[in-house]
Amino acid sequence: MAARPRIKDVAEYAGVSPKTVSNVINNFEHVSERTRTAVQEAIDALGYRVNIAGRQLRQGRTGMITLAVPELDVAYFSELARHVMEAAGRHGRTVLIDHTGGDRERELAALHGFDTQFCDGVILSPLSLLPRDLATRDRRLPLVLLGERAAEGHTDHVGIDNVRAAREATEHLLARGRRRIAVIGGTLRGRQGTDRLRTDGYREALAAAGQPFDAGLVVPVEAYHWRDGAEAAARLARDASPPDALLCLNDNLALGALRALHEVGVRVPADIDVIGFDDIQASRFSVPSLSTVAPDKQEIARLAVTLLLDRVDTPDSAAPYRDEVVAHRIVVRESSGG
């Protein structure tokens, strides 16, 4: 097998010094066009490729970033991971993916880069971290938070406006004449996580429409999986005064609810409307197709990678931390009259 060409080989072929080849590769401006052309012709002829890994190691970097998410078997996170990998790839970075399970110790390990030097920075979607964890973290490790755990000025953060998104989804159901709207996955307790923020948005919509709030229609779940949505919907369908709409706080819950309603003979949307969150691919192919809140996952990934690499490439930057709010839209499909 032929040896991989080196800068020295390119220099000999072009009749210049290795330093000149390096200047051309790094776009050093004080190189004549004639010399630049000769070096480029030598690079093309020899098939020389820049050793990105070697360059990164010389700069004290690995070329790898970590994406830590709660559950890869929740479709939103697997789809988001694909977008992050694509965004990072455009910058020549490799993504390591960690499944934290929402475990506090695992999230703390990700927050501190797993106490190793195998990645240049971390994009983290936490469930269990506390504000003090962020306040005391090692700021030398670049970090971007995703989701709803407010960074509180301690790191860069990317997310959607969950209160507004849930309010708009509820307003859509109210506009269709629905009045007993249940929230599967909602909560009236705890810190300002996803479930609480989306429940707050639901309550805001009810209040603005002059509709009474019934705490019994807020249905917590153990997990945001299909089975949890199915079980919650089945219980609600058996109530003496069942709801006429379901706001499900992710698409997995909504898809499970659709199945359970079908099994007990409740028609969607004739008897009840259903809307989810996240716009995962499966929502477009369910029967009926699922209305949903669609966050711009591609933009979330792009911004997260951009913010992280800005910190990686300028480690001494004193730039203030950024809190980026990404757009969302309500996608109306068959499950709510679309």
Image (tube, rainbow, N blue to C red):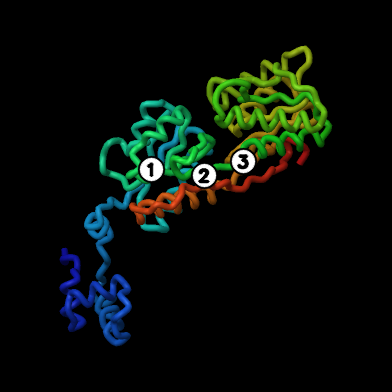
Tag 3 secondary structure? loop
Q: Amino acid at mark 1?
A: Val
Q: Nearer the viewer, residue 314 or 272?
A: 314
Relative to residue 30, is residue 210 depicted above or below? above
Name which residue lies at 57% across and 46% down: 325
Relative to residue 337, is residue 319 depicted above or below? below
Tag 2 secondary structure? strand
The residue labelled by disc 1 is: 122
Say if residue 71 shows up in the picture: no
Find the distance from the CA under tag 2 to the CA under tag 1: 13 Å
Extreme residue toward the top, this view: 240
Around disc 1, counting alpha carbons within 10 Å, would you say few (fewer than 14), some (14 to 19), or many (20 or more)?
Answer: many
Q: Nearer the viewer, residue 143 or 327?
A: 143
Find the distance from the CA under tag 1 to the CA under tag 3: 22 Å
Q: Which mark is residue 158?
A: 2
Around disc 2, counting alpha carbons within 10 Å, would you say few (fewer than 14), some (14 to 19), or many (20 or more)?
Answer: many
Tell me which numbered mark, 2 or 1, is placed earlier along the sequence: 1
Q: Is residue 164 left or right of residue 240?
A: left
Residue 70, quarter of picture: top left
Q: Amino acid at mark 2?
A: Val
Residue 12 horizontal/vertical position (percent): 16, 79
